[in-house]
Image (cartoon, rainbow, N blue to C red):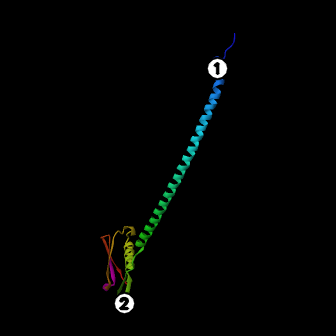
């Protein structure tokens, strides 16, 4: 008795030989189609990349414009905040800067045992005929400092 190999029907070897050329032809056709599709895909990818680069450039330009506008706004705001006029009071040959009177009032308030950070409001009343400046801090504490 002849031993048969399990899993292989008789005549399978011949059928396999006949289908090999057909499979090779189909594979060549698939490869050619894939090659065309690959070329199309590469062109599409290149177009997408070019578009992405263009969008990125536009975004960078917009960001640069916004930064420039922000810098200009900050400079303008800083210029407005920096302007602090110096007011000078002159009376009977004496002269004093109002800013100095403000600093004297703050210093006296702190020397009385209060904290500088607790000052929320400060009103300063100048009385040149008395050579004095009166102050009221936080609507509670009042005092007097020399003006000249």
Q: Which mark is residue 93?
A: 2
In terms of image quadrants, where is residue 19?
top right
Q: Position of residue 98 (x, y in %)?
A: 37, 80
81 shown above or below 43:
below
Query: Which residue is outermost to the top?
Result: 1
Query: Which residue is outermost to the bottom?
Result: 93
Q: Which mark is residue 58?
A: none
Which residue appears at 51% of the width and 52% of the height?
51
Which residue appears at 33% of the width and 84% of the height?
131
According to the picture, the residue beneath numbered tag 1 turns out to be 12
| Marks 1/2: CA–CA distance | 127 Å
61 shown above or below 50:
below
Give the magenta-colored segment's residue range: 129-134
- Work out whether residue 99 or residue 130 is closer to the camera in this orientation and state it: 99
Q: Position of residue 28 (x, y in %)?
A: 62, 34
Q: Nearer the viewer, mark 1 or mark 2?
A: 1
73 left or right of 57 in image: left
Q: Position of residue 40 (x, y in %)?
A: 56, 44
- Quadrant of the drawing holding the N terminus: top right
Q: Is residue 131 covered in magenta?
A: yes
For label 2, the SS is loop
Mark 1 crowd level (few <14, some 14–19, many ≥20, 10 Å Cα): few
Query: Which residue is outermost to the right?
Result: 1
Which residue appears at 57% of the width and 46% of the height?
42
């Amino acid at each position: 008795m002849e031993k048969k190999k399990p899993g292989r029907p008789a005549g399978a070897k011949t059928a396999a030989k006949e289908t090999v050329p057909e499979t090779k032809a189909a594979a060549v056709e698939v490869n050619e189609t894939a090659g065309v599709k690959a070329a199309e895909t590469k062109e599409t990818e290149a177009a997408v990349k070019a578009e992405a680069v263009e969008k990125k450039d536009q975004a960078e330009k917009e960001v640069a414009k916004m930064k420039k506008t922000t810098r200009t706004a900050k400079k303008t705001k800083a210029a407005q905040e920096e302007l602090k006029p110096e007011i000078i009071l002159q009376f009977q040959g004496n002269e004093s800067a109002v800013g100095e009177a403000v600093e004297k009032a703050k210093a006296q308030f702190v020397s009385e045992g209060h904290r500088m950070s607790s000052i929320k409001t400060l009103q300063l009343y100048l009385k040149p005929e008395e050579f004095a400046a009166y102050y009221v801090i936080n609507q509670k504490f009042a005092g007097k400092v020399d003006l000249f």
